[in-house]
Amino acid sequence: MRTLFREFVLLIIVFSPTIGALVFYHQLPDTMATHFGADNEVNDTMSKQMTIMVFTIIGLVPILFPLMRRFEQRQIKDAKFILAIHVSRYCLALLLAIAGWSILTYNLGYSLDIRRIVFIAVGVLFLVIGNYLGIIKPNNVMGFRTPWALRDDENWRKTHRLGGPVMVIGGLIILVATFLPVCVSIFIFFGTMASVFLVPISYSFMMFKRKRH
């Protein structure tokens, strides 16, 4: 019963932009703004029907997590790992829902700072997931899935024990950058995003090379 309720809540979250778009269908413009530049100006559009279709397709991503895990060569029963997977699914679902509702709200005529919304959402996502990276086991769904870490449990463990704090720090930096001038915040955002992924991946490769010598 708890599993069914959890999956039902997840469905509501991920498909809420689609539901919202259908509810407000006649109030939305036929051509919707769907992508925004750093200056909050629209730089891409899509038809109303296509936007709703994209909302629906993107909403399937968190739902497919369990299906992807069924193709794992080794099924991991560790409770903490399973919890980390579910937390990640909910975080991703919330991030996608926020993005969808931001687009809907803007197209309904409300003024929004899309850049700030994205920065805050990503910063919080990094803060939450970073706290769980240290406990996840080798898998093909979540984490820094470098070929060297997937072949070596020690490499995986050390990579994620480093990657977790790096992601948390990155999330904090992005949240602070949200309130800085636009040009500075964008530079910090992309620099931080690159560092959050490159530092653990580089560390994983260095451990792999060290073991070979």
Image (spheres, rainbow, N blue to C red):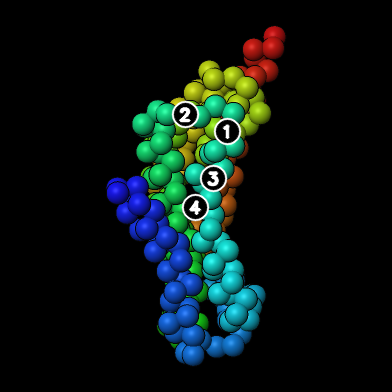
Residue at image location 49% in from the left, 33% down from the top: 163
Q: Residue tagged by mark 3?
A: 67
Q: Which residue is mark 4?
A: 62
Q: Please name the residue that numbered disc 1 is placed on.
A: 72
Number of the front mark, 2 or 4: 2
Residue 49 lies, in percent from the top left, at: 60, 80
Query: Which numbered dot is residue 76?
Result: 2
Tag 1 near tag 3, CB within 8 Å = no
Q: Quadrant of residue 34?
A: bottom right
**Is the C terminus in the top left, top right, bottom left or bottom right quadrant?**
top right
Q: Position of residue 201 (x, y in %)?
A: 60, 32
* Distance from the alpha carbon under mark 3 to that under mark 2: 14 Å
> Is label 4 in a helix, a strand or a loop?
helix
The span from disc 4 to disc 1 (Cα, nearest Å) is: 17 Å
**Figure disc tally:** 4
Closer to the chain start, of discs 2 and 4, is: 4
Q: Residue at x 48, y 72 (%)?
A: 18
Which residue is farthest left? 2
Earlier-in-chain disc, 3 versus 2? 3
Whether tag 1 and tag 2 are in contact, CB under 8 A, the answer is yes
* Picture residue at 43% right of the left edge, 76% below the top: 20
Secondary element at image label 1:
loop
- Name the element at disc 3: helix
Neighbour tally class for label 2: few under 14, some 14-19, many 20 plus, Cα within 10 Å: some
